[in-house]
Amino acid sequence: MTALTTDLVGYEDAVRRYDPVLGIEVHVELGTRTKMFCSAEVSFGAAPNTQVTPVSLGLPGALPVLNGKAVEYAIRIGLALNCTIAESCRFARKNYFYPDVPKNFQTSQYDEPIAYDGWIDVELEDGSLFRVEIERAHMEEDAGKNTHVGGATGRIHGAEYSLVDYNRAGIPLVEIVTRPITGVGDRAPEVARAYVQTLRDIFRALDVSEARMERGNVRADVNVSLRPTANDPLGTRTETKNVNSFRSVERAVRFEVSRQAGVLDAGLPVIQETRHWHEDTGVTTSGRVKSDAEDYRYFPEPDLVPVAPSREWVEEIRASLPEMPVARRNRLQADWGYADAEMRDVVNAGALDLIEATVAAGTSPAGARKWWMGELARRAKQDEVTLEELTVTPAQIAQLQGLVDSGRINDKLARQVLEGVLAGEGDPEAVVVARGLEVVSDDGPLLEAIDAALAAQPDIVAKVKGGNLGPVGAIIGAVMKATRGQADASRVRELVLERIGA
């Protein structure tokens, strides 16, 4: 109701008069073959209600069995977040009724999480680091998926009926909960985005999840509150649920800061509630009054024994952890010789893995960056896709640059070759042959084109003979046009000057 009766405050004005505090809960679907407590297989896009068992359907008498690989993945995540791994922990029942939770409770962890007291440093756009403290990382199962049919919003309000798909029910999750993130000031949206992006990169590095936000593998619940100053108690928070893109995380924080400032300016209280994020309009709307822990009536899960990972196993997992994303970026930047701004652009564009693979395929770091951050970035923006979604591979880009380095094609021809690759005409070598794009290296055809250009522009020839080399570019341009750009411009210049006798 408050969102309808108050005006938004400009973001810059809001953060000048209020101190924003964040809290972020990130859910990551683990990439296990089966569900958390049963043998139902997990795969994206299966027909509704085909990946279910009596356990994931909550049928009477069905008993859960814990997925050991999910426990391993949870420990890997906890260690990567610098958490303490519990010597013993247990599951609890989180009780609430909703049609996508067939048991009427979610099996989760409450007061005894598997990992706790951690932190990670996230890198902001200017290269500075911001430390986010982790309260806990706990295991739980996902709920099913509701599809509300009819109505204008796709939500339950106004829908004619709802369909429930239990394929997702029981998929293993790890939920990572931060402590209150203070001291963010006007950079609150940037910090939130960088934190979620850092977590996504860690999940991928650990190989515990595909971490594809567009598929819901990673979802963020973004808590925002305002207080007059950093010395005041924390304000009342709202929780914007299931935000599933980095840009949306940033926009949701910015909107909630502006909205809550308007509520407080009007002398009204901020309501502790969940809120829905609307990607199309960039606003949040009220969901339900936020439940506190006691409302869920947590109690220990009687059908599962405590989890007690041995210290030896934990240390084995620790020893197997891969290089973390920040350390990897620093190493690659040093190896490649990129400036700080260049490396940030690469990371922000999602090109790091692609450039690394292109370099591994034999291209120089400068050559790989030239293509992925230049022509390919332009094409991705034009087609409204990510770089990874373009129909070209790092190996093909390495081959393309190799053709340029060998002198068989120049950069102008290389762009035509790339067009052919993107159009599905084959690898760069095949496109060069099929389109006849190789550089003209035989001096005979070049001299014919040069003589024709000289004969057509005698005034320029006279100027060049008189010692003015500036106009020679016109001759070179005419030759390049006559050869459809397939001549080596430096060789053309050399032959033109020889022909003129300059």
Image (cartoon, grey):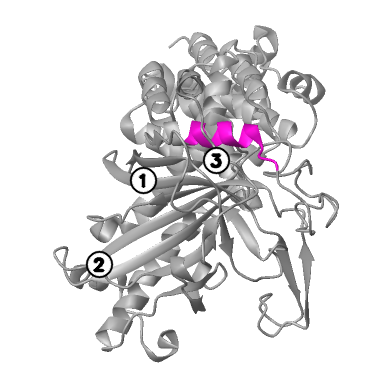
Q: Residue at the spot x=53%, y=51% of the render?
A: 27
- Local packing at callout 1 (Cα closer than 10 Å; few below 14, some 14-19, many 20+) is many
Most distant residue in the left direction: 231
Residue at which label 3 appears: 306
As drawn, is 136 to the left or to the right of 458?
A: left
> Mark 1 belongs to which amino acid?
Ile
Q: Is residue 398 left or right of residue 164?
A: left
Residue nearest the observer in this picture, 330 or 88: 88
- Mark 3 element type: loop
| Mark earlier in primary sequence (2, 3) | 2
| Element type at mark 1 | strand
Image x and y of residue 376, in percent: 58, 37
Marks 1/3: CA distance?
A: 23 Å
The amino acid pointed to by label 3 is: Pro
Contact, mark 1 vs mark 3 (Cβ under 8 Å): no
Residue 258, quarter of the rendered image: bottom left
- Under circle 2, the secondary element is loop
Q: Determine if residue 452 is in view.
A: no
Amino acid type for the residue under numbered disc 2? Leu
Range covered by the magenta-colored residues? 65-77
Taking depth in this image into account, of 365 and 423 the one nearest to the observer is 365
Quadrant of the drawing holding the C terminus = top left
The residue that mark 2 highlights is 234
Where does label 1 land, which residue? 134
**What residue is at 69 percent from the left and 81 percent from the top?**
152
- Residue found farthest to the front: 302
Instruction: Give the crowd class for mark 2: few <14, some 14-19, many >=20 residues within 10 Å.
Output: some
